[in-house]
Amino acid sequence: MKILVDTHAFLWFINDSPNLSDHAATLMESDVDLLFSPQQIECNSIEILPITLDHLKVIATLPFHHRDPFDRLLIAQTTIENIEIISADKKFDDYGVTRQW
């Protein structure tokens, strides 16, 4: 299983923050492929999900429930790649993506 990780979830995970839900922590510690968008982090041990033209095309069609351009990119990536996202941001739910928290 592949799952995209929102920046705040990753930062809370590596800092052992109580803000990270138990479910999100369990997912991140399990045997799943954690994906990150290039603008989030560059690290040798993390698989980067590259930004493609298809992702950008989806961004252009998204309604403006969420105005953060980076989060809109994550929404496009989860849609095109048919993957879930780990995020506390409930605005993702308005786009029909599967959000784990």
Image: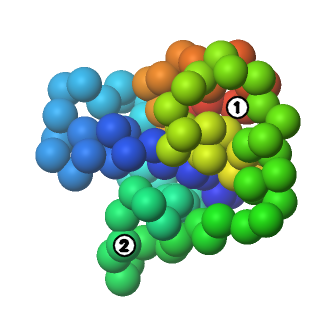
Regarding residue 39, the answer to whether it shows in the image is yes
Mark 2 Cα within 10 Å, few/some/many (few <14, many 20+)? Answer: few
The residue located at (83%, 52%) in the rendering is: 57
Front one among 60 and 39: 60
Q: Secondary structure at mark 2?
A: loop
Residue 13 image position (x, y, % from top left): 27, 45
With 50 as the anchor, is 24 left or right in this view?
left
Query: Which residue occupies 17% across, 41% down?
Result: 16
Q: Is residue 50 left or right of residue 11?
A: right
Whole-percent x, y for residue 61 in the image: 84, 36
Residue 42: numbered disc: 2
Which quarter of the picture shows residue 54? bottom right
Residue bearing mark 1: 98
Mark 2 vs 1: CB contact within 8 A: no
Precedes in sequence: disc 2 or disc 1: 2
Q: Nearer the viewer, mark 2 or mark 1?
A: 2
Identify which amino acid the numbered label 2 is placed on.
Glu
When the figure is inspected, residue 68 is found, relative to residue 54, above or below; the finding is: above
Label 1: how many residues lie within 10 Å, few (<14), some (14-19) or many (20+)?
some
Compared with 92, 58 (above or below) is: below
Residue type at the position of mark 1? Thr
Residue at 74% x, 54% y is 56
The residue lying at 25 percent from left, 25 percent from top is 19
**Residue 84 visible in the shown view:** no
